[in-house]
Image: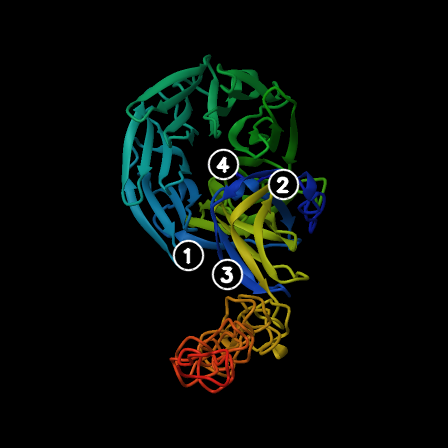
């Protein structure tokens, strides 16, 4: 059985196990280009200047900015094997998928009637559910893909010439007869950007059929097109559709002993020949299994029936193709399934008739040659016995391989898992203004996690992201770095700070407390917190001591004539020589010859009689006439 998986994280093939591709984080910030602020939130929004605060940035569009690193862990991982379904002759024509919750889905045929079953592993146990019976005496080679809504799409062919499509919407299955006149044998299925299925198959005829065909669903109805006509060609096909809805199909042209590859990327179908042979030379292209990596490189596992070996062809449209013989130990390489890991390395599982083994092959930088091993074998069997006659392979986002395969000897469905040993991390530089920067993990498109760096000085800084191209993207969020020895960051150590939790500049009555008018006195100790010239009012008259001529006399504040008598008490506040007018005649006592006689103020002749009453004010000897 052949399945494929397009891994969306391939960046490079690494040079050795344990080799890490580091991010280029030493950036010249003066060459960075700014974009509009990205709307984000930060939790937490403050931490110590010593760093170590784990924070989460939430926003959107982070994945496109991140740099991807691929690492080999160097561990010799082993297969873990179990039985997924003990049903009668379970596991035939199987296909496997893993959903976004990590649940494993296997669709397979059971019993002599090829009744289809959906077996699901939820992390603890397997649950089988009957789907439908085969629409013929036997069905062949189920192929399945899963969409971004966790819905399953499967296709198979029947001995009655049908192509059947099955769809699982998360709760129930439906099926549709897509077309008639098909050759029973392997088919391929892929989804376009609208999650509409497209199925590759060959027309009915002997041997390899009557030409490559593609059945497509447009959301309403199915239509079928002939991609390449001719007898004895088009069988054993596999299909991939890329993000631009371009289709790529690998298939066999048995008449010419060729493995062919065709694509409509240019607008019309163009065909290439990744591998070719001839009578008594090679017959490649049997059981084709196709995968594509993130660099647009295609990988095909296939069987050469003339030399009875497993082959691997790789290349690109309009480019060079190469073919390796992966395993030539006896009659081996039947029914291969291929998947590509995050490093771009191929992984193939396949059936060997030499010893009736189910085998595994991979190619990675730890060795220049293919590494071949056995997953399971049943020595002493015969054709039709042993494991892996039907199989399927997928690699999940965590780098775990999931394999479904038959155990023909015991009539059960088997399931095996093994880590590829490849870890993928997405990283980005987070910059805190001019205070410092750190490498952060991009968890997904909306989440970044990081540990804050140690910085020299406290303060609130802007946050920005520096992408793999060196462009800086300002965030709407800020982060405050706090000195644990100066919690309010006012420059006064906590031990000497009378207000350690509130920043301030006061120095006279208290240290480090708020001082709005910057006069040195704290707001709480300043009678006039908004007047830089005043801070005390001893007599409580509302006038500061500095402006109060009588700071200890609440009844006086000014002495306009500076005679030592407050204006409020001074009968003559603007005459420094007078303060009192005892008789109220408007003449101060100091100038009034008769301070207690409001009728008199002067005695010009000094005879003791006021001028007003003195008939002779200039003659001291006369007063009356």
Spatial distance from mark 2 to mark 4, Cα to Cα? 30 Å
Residue placed under numbered mark 4 in the picture: 4
**Residue neighbourhood size for the residue with mark 3, other residues' Cα within 10 Å, grouped as few (<14), some (14–19), many (≥20):** few
Can you name the residue that lies furthest to the top here?
230
The way the protein has been coloured in the rendering is rainbow
Q: Is residue 205 left or right of residue 560?
A: left
Spatial distance from mark 2 to mark 3, Cα to Cα? 25 Å
Would you say the residues marked 3 and 4 are in contact, meaning their CB atoms lie under 8 Å apart? no
Q: Which circle's residue, 3 or 4, is located before the other in the chain?
A: 4
**Residue neighbourhood size for the residue with mark 2, other residues' Cα within 10 Å, grouped as few (<14), some (14–19), many (≥20):** some
Spatial distance from mark 3 to mark 4, Cα to Cα? 42 Å
Question: Looking at the image, which residue is at 41% across and 15% down?
Answer: 226
For residue 5, above or below residue 258: below
Residue placed under numbered mark 1 in the picture: 123
Residue placed under numbered mark 2 in the picture: 468
Would you say the residues marked 3 and 1 are in contact, meaning their CB atoms lie under 8 Å apart? no
For residue 351, above or below residue 234: below
Q: Quadrant of residue 519?
A: bottom right
Looking at the rendered image, the quarter that the C terminus falls into is: bottom left
Question: Looking at the image, which residue is at 63% across and 44% down?
Answer: 372
Q: Is residue 185 left or right of residue 517?
A: left
Spatial distance from mark 3 to mark 1, Cα to Cα? 34 Å
Q: Quadrant of residue 349?
A: top right
**Residue neighbourhood size for the residue with mark 1, other residues' Cα within 10 Å, grouped as few (<14), some (14–19), many (≥20):** few
Spatial distance from mark 4 to mark 1, Cα to Cα? 23 Å
Q: Residue 355: in sight, yes or no?
A: no
Can you tell which mark lies on residue 44? Answer: 3
Q: Secondary structure at mark 2?
A: loop
Q: Secondary structure at mark 3?
A: loop
Q: Which circle's residue, 4 or 1, is located before the other in the chain?
A: 4
């Amino acid at each position: 059985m052949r399945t494929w998986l397009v891994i969306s994280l391939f960046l490079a093939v690494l040079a050795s196990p344990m080799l890490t591709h580091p991010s280029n984080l030493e950036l010249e910030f003066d060459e960075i280009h700014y974009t509009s602020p990205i709307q984000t939130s930060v939790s937490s929004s403050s931490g110590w200047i010593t760093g170590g605060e784990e924070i989460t940035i939430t926003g959107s569009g982070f994945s496109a900015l991140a740099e991807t690193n691929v690492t080999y862990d160097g561990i010799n991982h082993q297969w873990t094997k179990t039985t997924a379904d003990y049903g009668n002759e379970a596991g035939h024509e199987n296909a496997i998928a893993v959903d976004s919750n990590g649940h494993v889905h296997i669709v397979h045929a059971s019993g002599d009637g090829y009744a289809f079953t959906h077996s699901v592993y939820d992390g603890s146990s397997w649950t089988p559910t009957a789907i439908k019976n085969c629409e013929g005496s036997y069905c062949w080679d189920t192929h399945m893909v899963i969409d971004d809504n966790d819905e399953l799409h499967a296709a198979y062919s029947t001995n009655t010439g049908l192509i059947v499509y099955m769809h699982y919407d998360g709760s129930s299955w439906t099926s549709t007869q897509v077309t008639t006149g098909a050759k029973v044998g392997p088919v391929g299925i892929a989804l376009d950007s609208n999650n509409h299925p497209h199925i590759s198959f060959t027309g009915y005829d002997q041997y390899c059929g009557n030409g490559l065909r593609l059945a497509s669903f447009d959301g309403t109805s199915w239509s079928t097109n002939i991609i390449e006509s001719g007898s004895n060609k088009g069988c054993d096909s596999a299909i991939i559709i890329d993000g631009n809805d371009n289709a790529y199909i690998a298939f066999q042209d048995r008449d010419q002993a060729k493995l062919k590859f065709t694509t409509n990327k240019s607008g019309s179908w163009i065909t290439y020949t990744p591998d070719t042979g001839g009578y008594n030379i090679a017959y490649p292209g049997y059981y084709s299994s196709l995968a594509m990596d993130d660099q647009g490189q295609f990988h095909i596992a296939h069987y050469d029936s003339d030399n009875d070996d497993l082959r691997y062809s790789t290349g690109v449209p309009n480019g060079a193709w190469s073919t390796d013989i992966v395993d030539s130990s006896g009659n081996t390489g039947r029914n291969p399934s291929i998947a590509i890991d995050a490093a771009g390395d191929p992984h193939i599982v396949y059936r060997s008739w030499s010893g009736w083994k189910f085998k595994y092959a991979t190619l990675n930088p730890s060795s220049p040659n293919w590494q071949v091993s056995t997953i399971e074998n049943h020595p002493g069997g015969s054709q039709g016995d042993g494991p892996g006659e039907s199989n399927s392979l997928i690699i999940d986002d965590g780098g775990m391989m999931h394999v479904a395969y038959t155990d023909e000897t015991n009539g059960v469905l088997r399931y095996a898992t093994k880590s590829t040993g490849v870890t993928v991390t997405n990283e980005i530089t987070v910059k805190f203004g001019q205070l410092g920067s750190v490498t952060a993990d991009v968890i997904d498109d909306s989440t970044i996690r990081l540990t804050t760096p140690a910085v020299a000085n406290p303060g609130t800084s802007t946050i920005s992201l520096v992408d793999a191209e060196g462009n800086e993207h300002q965030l709407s969020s800020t982060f405050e770095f706090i000195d644990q020895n100066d919690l309010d960051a006012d420059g006064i150590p906590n031990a000497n700070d009378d207000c350690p939790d509130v920043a301030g500049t006061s120095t006279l009555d208290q240290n480090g407390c708020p001082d709005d008018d910057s006069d040195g006195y704290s707001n709480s100790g300043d009678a006039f917190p908004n007047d830089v010239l005043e801070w005390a009012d001893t007599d409580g008259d509302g006038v500061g001591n500095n402006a109060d001529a009588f700071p200890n006399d609440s009844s006086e504040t000014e002495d306009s004539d500076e005679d030592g008598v407050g204006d409020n008490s001074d009968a003559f506040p603007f005459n420094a020589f007078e303060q009192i007018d005892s008789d109220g005649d408007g003449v101060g006592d100091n100038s009034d010859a008769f301070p207690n006689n409001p009728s008199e103020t002067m005695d010009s002749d000094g005879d003791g009689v006021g001028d007003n009453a003195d008939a002779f004010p200039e003659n001291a000897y006369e007063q009356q006439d």
